[in-house]
Image (cartoon, coloured by chain):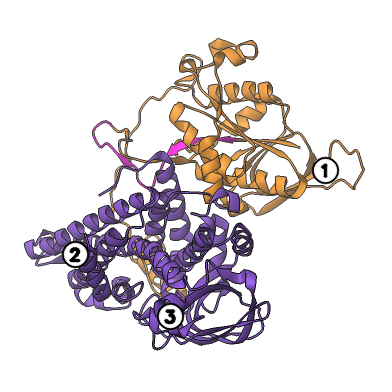
Amino acid sequence: MTLLYTKEQKALISLVHDVAEQELKPYVAQADRDGKCPEELYEFGFDLGLHLVEVPKEYGGTGLDYETTAMIFEELAKIDAGYAITFVTTFVALRNVILAGTPEQAQYFADVVKQRKFAAFALTEPNAGSDVAGMRSTATKVDGGYVLNSTKTFITNGGIASIYIVFCKTDFEAGAHGITAFIVDRDMPGVRVGAEEDKMGLRLSNTTELLLDDVFVPEDRVLGKVGEGMKLALNALNLSRAFVCTMGVGIMQRALDEALAYATERKQFGKPLASFQLVQGLLADMAIKTEAARCVVNNTMRLMDAGSLVQLEGAICKTFVTDSMQEVVSNAVQVMGGYGYSREYPVEKLMRDAKVFQIFEGTNQIQRTTIAKLLANG
Amino acid sequence: MKIAVCMKQVPDTTEIKIDPVKNTLIRKGVPSIMNPYDRHALEMALQLKDRHGAEVVALTMGPSQAIDILEEAYAMGADEVYLITDRKFGGSDTFATSYILSAALDHLGPFDLVLGGKQAIDGDTGQTISSLAQHMDCACINQVLDLQVESSPAGATNSNPTVTVKRKTDEGVEVLETTLPLVCTVMKESNKPRYASIQSTLDALEHEAQQICLDDLAALLDESKIGLKGSPTRVQKSFVPERCAEGVFIEGAPKDQAHDLVEQLVEAKLLV
């Protein structure tokens, strides 16, 4: 199963495959148990340049298109999607500053990331998940800037980022139009990292609370226009949604690879499992879903490369890929039976990793609502 | 310092199978890779470049697809890469290959240091680099584990620094001191080769490898010593060794393994 890869794409996929197999894979099982990615493992990701893959050349990145970037992260996610998402979150945050901010803000943000630092996107709050407009964080106008007070939760890279995009209300009366985005440095007085989530899956991804207590940010840290944070957040989610899908395909492909290898080796009643028709059915369904998901993701990426905001296509992609993931990883466990359920083999981790893909970046229920609304509005 | 690294594109022998009828390697569908030992030789050159500043030139002789390993070498940090290719070079054995390589190095040089892997994993002869040194009339140290070049004090004009080389022998490790120019074959244990980055891989794909053909080396080569007709090696027969017994894996703690092994050797009357 394959797309029509260019020579460049093949070379980059091969490079990431080799490095991830040799430098990451041996440590994943233990890091998953520990619920923490050892810091030294980040080094090879920075050496590869994963934090700058999609970043334009003028900001020190490699300037690759979304399509090729997605292929690289599918490959990395086969080994660990939690590790991959750490880097994806970073360059997606930077991309949003480039899209919405001033050239000076983009340069500042890029300069931080280039120093092998992570970035994060702080939107979700304890009482504002899908209902973004219900956020309680405040940004109060003062002389020369704003004072931010906020409790953010489920922040990917929250504890390891050096720079954040934080969303706060600048006008409570204006509802969704009262939200503004700010660029916040980790070392600004009043910025604190709160509790780390003890998650079911993606345990190499750092997820924490982020607490802002009377944090002063100067005027030039307002990202985009005051009151236009919601628009910025939705555009950012379109981008990150597409990238979680590519990591989803990585997880599906790994599940298929593991199940197929096992079914070919394992014998019952004197024959390999893969020779039994009901097992063949499971494997074929996995391959069908994985291949279709890859094609949908590839099309979404190509649309984004052409300048589309992929509001509809991104929502369809997210829902199809991440729902399909559940079937594929569950089938992998089923094919491998008791061994699939055991921590001795990697597929139980894939099943745990997969679940959150239906939840984050907009739940699949919200996505379906969006799809229906967009269809109805033509 | 100018360093040449001689490399070879080889079939990935972890993927290779032998045709039981023809007794030849089945190359179809087998990926080609940079000879793993050569990767360590390149890393040694790049480490010397990092420490002392050097120009690292990677070269390989082979068909046009061998460019793939040169792109990899460039992505890892080689300053320039050369493909030595000509239909008339085809069929060269280790003697002819090393003769052509020596002419190419003469053409591109002079070099202070020439490195290559201890052997290539396809032919496994380990002859080419030593033979190259002979053609170059240069000292050669094989199976090198470490190579240190004495740093010249700032402002000094020491054109021929001392080189300390550790090489692996059957008895242990030998430490030798010599001067440049020098030819060495490098062991896997010498270093951990670096990876290319995404950016350097992209750069390498844009960089065109220079090609050297027979015309470029005509003045330096005797054509009767190249290609199939210039190769003294004759393969009389190739065969797949017969597998007369299955291997036995002894598992457990080292002490238990040793005990089991002795018991099995006694049982087989190989030990009394």
Magenta range: B6-22
Q: Does the magenta stretch include residue B19?
A: yes
At label 2, which amino acid type do we have?
Ala
Same subunit, labels 2 and 3: the answer reads yes
Q: Which residue lies furthest to the front in this view?
A: A173
The Cα atoms of the two marked residues, 2 and 1, are separated by 79 Å
Front in this rendered view, residue A44 or A340 = A44
Q: Nearer the viewer, mark 1 or mark 3?
A: 3
| Snapshot quadrant of residue B7 | top right
Q: Colour of chain B?
A: orange
The Cα atoms of the two marked residues, 2 and 3, are separated by 26 Å
* Quarter the C terminus of chain A occupies: bottom left
The image shows residue B69 at horizontal and vertical percentages of: 50, 38
| Snapshot quadrant of residue A42 | bottom right
The Cα atoms of the two marked residues, 1 and 3, are separated by 76 Å
Front in this rendered view, residue A116 or B33 = A116
Q: Does the magenta stretch include residue A244?
A: no
Name the residue tied to disc 2. A376
Q: Chain A is drawn in which colour?
A: purple
Name the residue tied to disc 1. B162
The numbered dot on residue A174 is: 3
Task: State whether residue B66 is above or below residue A246.
Answer: above
